[in-house]
Image (tube, rainbow, N blue to C red):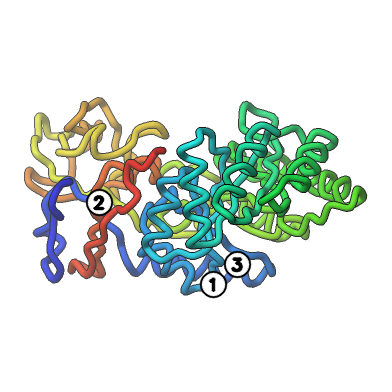
């Protein structure tokens, strides 16, 4: 683990780079906005902790009304529980005896729910629940998007699996997990809306089938930052799993709103802080942050205040940009905020958050669940 790149009270200019910055005013406002939206629609909010990997941030979300968090991995769930989070949904299928036993142990400490999309997985969960003397809420994961995602097919296959879960010792069928992943990043609003409408219809139809067979289905969870208002207003979904809204990133910045303009529901609060270490030409610059400082899976980071600068290359430690036809406006040694292309994997590259207000460091938080991929 690296030591923190800053200390509380210093100026932003004094922070060592590369560093993971969080604008605390923007973070607080994003938390408030999503909490208000969920409350207005009468749905629960269970933000995804894979975005921030921090129980400190999770507790801030819960202080504004979130019921708990989602996690993708058992290790993430353990970090959240050890940090004081008491209600956790593992919104993923978990395989392997050692991992399932860790779920059983966690369920003795906090409220744990988990997803399944196959009978063998449900049977293994039942065995662990009985062995640890716990009861686990289980959600049947249904495929509402049609791509190569986890999830049993909706309708009769979901009914068979839910019935199986309902009959197993130590398990309680709790509802449906219905997450339309790829819809979050469909750029134009009408197409995004159409895909989510189909997902809502699938979830509602499956719920109706289950309830006609005597299986109560009061919990339908899913949604994300790009579509939260659609599921929230559906009358079908009871819970939102949005995660990236607290930070936003360059990828979500490419989505369009219903009016065709930019998607501006939330503010950028997460940045990679970087120093200009070389100026090869008047129209170019090289930053001291590369592939090991910002995820490029959704494209390169965007320079704050200079969104149209062109990425022209880089490597593990460097990020190279140009402003063709114009002098690059920052000097050698200047420190600049970069908006990461994808916030979740970028956070996973750091040991510490540097929280700031205005130009002063106010908080140093560990990224407690960094690298916990088991």
Q: Point out the tag, 1 or 2, that comes first from the N-terminus.
A: 2
Q: Point out the tag, 2 or 3, that comes first from the N-terminus.
A: 2
- Tag nearer the camera, 1 or 3: 1
- Tag nearer the camera, 1 or 2: 1
Q: Position of residue 348 (x, y in %)?
A: 32, 43
Q: Position of residue 69 (x, y in %)?
A: 51, 58
- Viewport quadrant of the C terminus: top left
Q: Does residue 307 show up?
A: no
Q: Point out the tag, 1 or 3, that comes first from the N-terminus.
A: 3
* Front one among 4 and 249: 4
* Front one among 183 and 372: 372
Residue 37: which numbered mark, if any? 3
Tell me the element at label 3: helix
Q: Residues within 10 Å of mark 3 (few under 14, many from 20)?
A: some
Judging by the rendered image, the residue that carries numbered circle 1 is 65
Judging by the rendered image, the residue that carries numbered circle 2 is 20
């Amino acid at each position: 683990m690296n030591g923190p790149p800053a200390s509380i009270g210093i100026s932003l200019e004094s922070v060592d780079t590369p560093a993971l910055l969080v604008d605390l005013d923007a973070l607080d406002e994003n938390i408030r906005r999503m909490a208000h939206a969920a409350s207005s629609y009468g749905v629960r909010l269970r933000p995804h902790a894979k975005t921030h990997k921090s129980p400190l941030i999770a507790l801030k979300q819960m202080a504004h009304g979130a019921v708990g968090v989602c996690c993708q991995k058992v290790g993430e769930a353990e970090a959240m529980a050890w940090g004081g989070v008491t209600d956790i949904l593992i919104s993923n299928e978990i395989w392997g005896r050692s991992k399932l036993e860790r779920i059983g142990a966690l369920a003795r400490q906090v409220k744990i729910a988990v997803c399944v999309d196959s009978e063998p997985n449900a049977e293994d969960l039942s065995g662990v629940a009985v062995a640890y003397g716990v009861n686990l809420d289980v959600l049947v994961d249904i495929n509402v998007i049609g791509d190569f995602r986890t999830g049993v097919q909706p309708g009769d296959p979901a009914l068979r699996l839910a019935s199986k879960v309902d009959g197993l010792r130590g398990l309680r069928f709790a509802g449906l997990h219905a997450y339309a992943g790829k819809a979050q990043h469909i750029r134009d609003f009408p197409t995004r809306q159409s895909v989510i409408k189909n997902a809502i219809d699938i979830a509602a139809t499956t719920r109706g089938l289950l309830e006609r067979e005597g299986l109560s289905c009061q919990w339908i969870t899913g949604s994300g930052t790009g579509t939260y208002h659609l599921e929230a207003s559906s009358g079908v979904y009871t819970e939102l799993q949005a995660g990236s809204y607290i930070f936003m990133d360059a990828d979500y910045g490419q989505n369009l709103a219903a009016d065709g303009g930019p998607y501006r529901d939330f503010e950028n609060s997460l940045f990679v802080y970087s120093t200009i270490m070389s100026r090869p030409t008047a129209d170019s610059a090289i930053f001291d942050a590369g592939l090991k400082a910002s995820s490029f899976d959704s494209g390169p980071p965007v320079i704050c205040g200079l969104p149209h600068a062109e990425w022209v290359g880089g490597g593990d430690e460097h990020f190279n940009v140009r402003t063709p036809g114009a002098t690059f406006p920052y000097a050698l040694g200047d420190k600049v905020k970069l908006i990461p292309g994808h916030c979740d994997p970028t956070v996973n590259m750091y040991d510490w958050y540097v929280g700031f207000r205005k130009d002063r460091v106010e908080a140093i938080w560990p990224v407690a669940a960094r690298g916990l991929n088991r």
